Image: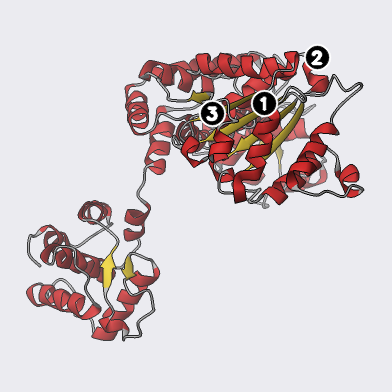
């Protein structure tokens, strides 16, 4: 590696105070270019260069030199550099936020967890067939609850060897034939099925379950059927798959546990009478009773690093910064708004992911300003942000449409009505806004249609000239006024026109 700098420049000269036989030796570009340098020498050279520039009371030329030196500085505990520590933190927390790593225990769902775990244990250990529905809104933790229960159950050696898992989704397996093919694939019975001629779907499924028998006929391996989006399976023809699965779960032949996950409270009303009679009517409802204090504790636990983090000093510094972050008043206000709008952890993970993206070598810990910026980004109105990039003419057309909405109580309008409203404003304020020709105004109107800030009502079915086609504004009064306040260098007359009660 060669250190290169332009000859004769200030950056091409350094003072080498450690050169043998010389008190002060000037290193020029020619000497540097012929001396091979290792990584350690480059770091020491950059540090000396920074000290020389600082002693001359000059601003360091590039921040990247300092970041480079900081990222390469080794820790005394484990030899990890700050750059490696930051990368490790981002990897651990992203796995946690993206649901790639399960929590130790479901928070706020202790009773539901014990109930589900006991049902699955009775099937896996004692051979007792069961069926249960896990009901809750999206993001409540249905899949996480089931995954945690399965993880603890499969840690048992006797269960891990025998239990078979079959996962089906109503979004992917749209009919019973596709579902049966997926069952055979997950149970590794493709070769057996290929040489067998089946009559009905029920015979096919019974054969598959009998094929799982191991040893004598009195013992068979327990099977867990996990049906995500359970309500979609009720739309299959005759509900044949559900009927046979629940029918097998009622028999004493093969231990089967049918676990359905759904967000519909009326899911039992979708089942046919013969299917409903074979269901055990066990339901586990995930209606969270999380308090704000528990929500704050979850926020802190999701940001804290585990005790087995390689660098002990960085671990203590990070966890201490997280504790200070939780005590910050502005962060608590953000969490309060997040808690009041949505108590599920999926939206919290999105907020933390945005804040985590700001962590770097020069900023190795989370700050309150990072959380505030992340909250501002996650709650930003996309349509209002589009308004910030519009021209003054397009913004005036939006204001004219807002006035038409107020005058005609939300009735649709066309381009000529908007243009007339805009001309009234031009006649009053001709000194501040340029008087555009109609083709130019119509071009701006078409651009608003392309941005979908204005929507045509006919949908292109009725063929009329674009100038006379009825449209409606897709923004409300609040969005327009907030966008005007943030619009850079917006003319005062335009703001006053938007705030006035008449066009």
- The secondary structure type at the circle numbered 3 is strand
* Residue under the point 33% across and 75% down: 458
Q: Position of residue 97 (x, y in %)?
A: 56, 31
Marks 3,1: beta carbons within 8 A: no
Residue indicated by mark 1: 250
Other residues around mark 1 within 10 Å, as few (<14) / some (14–19) / many (≥20) = many
* Residue under the point 78% across and 47% down: 33
Mark positioned earlier in the residue sequence (2 or 3): 3
From this view, report whether residue 308 is shown above or below residue 354: above
Q: Is any atom of residue 152 visible in this view?
A: no
Q: Position of residue 407 (x, y in %)?
A: 11, 66
Question: In this view of the protein, which residue sits in the foreground, 2 or 105?
Answer: 105
* Residue under the point 79% across and 43% down: 204
The C terminus lies in which quarter of the figure? bottom left
- The secondary structure type at the circle numbered 1 is helix
Res 243 quadrant in image: top right
Residue indicated by mark 2: 157
Mark positioned earlier in the residue sequence (2 or 1): 2
Mark positioned earlier in the residue sequence (3 or 1): 3
Residue indicated by mark 3: 134
Q: Is residue 143 left or right of residue 408?
A: right
- The secondary structure type at the circle numbered 2 is helix
Gap between marks 3 and 1 measured at Cα: 19 Å
From this view, report whether residue 156 is shown above or below residue 41: above
* Residue under the point 56% across and 48% down: 235
Question: In this view of the protein, which residue sits in the foreground, 473 or 383?
Answer: 473
The N terminus lies in which quarter of the figure? top right
Marks 2,3: beta carbons within 8 A: no
Other residues around mark 3 within 10 Å, as few (<14) / some (14–19) / many (≥20) = many
């Amino acid at each position: 590696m060669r250190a290169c700098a332009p000859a004769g420049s200030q950056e091409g000269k350094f003072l080498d105070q450690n050169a043998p036989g010389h008190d002060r030796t000037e290193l020029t570009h020619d000497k540097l270019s012929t001396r091979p340098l290792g990584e350690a020498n480059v770091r020491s050279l950059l540090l000396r260069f920074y000290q020389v520039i600082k002693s001359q009371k000059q601003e360091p030329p590039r921040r990247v030199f300092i970041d480079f030196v900081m990222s390469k500085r080794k820790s005394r505990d484990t030899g990890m550099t700050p750059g490696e520590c930051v990368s490790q933190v981002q990897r651990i927390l992203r796995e946690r936020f993206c649901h790639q790593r399960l929590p130790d225990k479901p928070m706020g769902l202790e009773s539901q967890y014990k109930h589900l775990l006991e049902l699955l244990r009775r099937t896996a250990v004692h051979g007792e067939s069961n069926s249960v529905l896990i009901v809750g809104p999206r993001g409540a933790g249905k899949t996480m609850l089931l995954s945690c229960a399965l993880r603890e159950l499969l840690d048992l050696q006797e269960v891990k060897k025998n239990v078979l898992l079959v996962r089906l989704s109503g979004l992917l397996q749209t009919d019973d034939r596709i579902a049966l093919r997926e069952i055979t694939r997950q149970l590794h019975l493709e070769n057996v099925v290929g040489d067998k001629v089946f009559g009905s779907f029920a015979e096919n499924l019974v054969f598959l379950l009998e094929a799982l028998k191991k040893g004598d006929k009195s013992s068979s391996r327990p099977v867990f059927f996990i049906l995500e989006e359970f309500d979609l399976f009720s739309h299959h023809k005759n509900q044949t798959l559900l009927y046979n699965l629940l029918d097998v779960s009622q028999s004493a032949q093969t231990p089967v546990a049918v676990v359905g996950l759904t967000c519909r409270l009326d899911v039992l009303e979708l089942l046919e009478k013969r299917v409903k009679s074979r269901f055990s009517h066990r339901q586990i409802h995930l209606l969270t009773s999380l308090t704000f204090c528990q929500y704050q504790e979850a926020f802190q636990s999701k940001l804290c690093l585990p005790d087995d983090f390689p660098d002990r000093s960085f671990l203590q510094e990070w966890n201490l910064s997280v504790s200070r972050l939780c005590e910050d008043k502005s962060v608590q206000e953000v969490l309060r708004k997040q808690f009041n709008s949505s108590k599920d952890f999926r939206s919290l993970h999105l907020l933390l992911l945005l804040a985590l993206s700001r962590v770097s070598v020069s900023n190795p810990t989370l700050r309150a300003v990072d959380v505030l910026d992340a909250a501002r980004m996650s709650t930003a109105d996309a349509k209002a942000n589009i308004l910030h990039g519009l021209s003054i003419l397009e913004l005036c057309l939006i204001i004219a449409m807002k006035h038409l909405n107020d005058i005609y109580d939300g009735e649709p309008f066309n381009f000529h009505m908007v243009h007339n409203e805009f001309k009234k404003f031009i006649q009053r304020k001709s000194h501040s806004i340029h008087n555009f020709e109609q083709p130019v105004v119509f071009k701006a109107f078409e651009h608003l249609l392309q941005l979908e800030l204005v929507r045509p009502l006919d949908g292109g079915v009725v063929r009329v000239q674009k100038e006379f086609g009825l449209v409606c504004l897709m923004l409300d009064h609040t969005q327009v006024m907030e966008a005007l306040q943030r619009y850079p260098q917006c003319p005062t007359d335009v703001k006053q026109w938007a705030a006035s009660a008449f066009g």
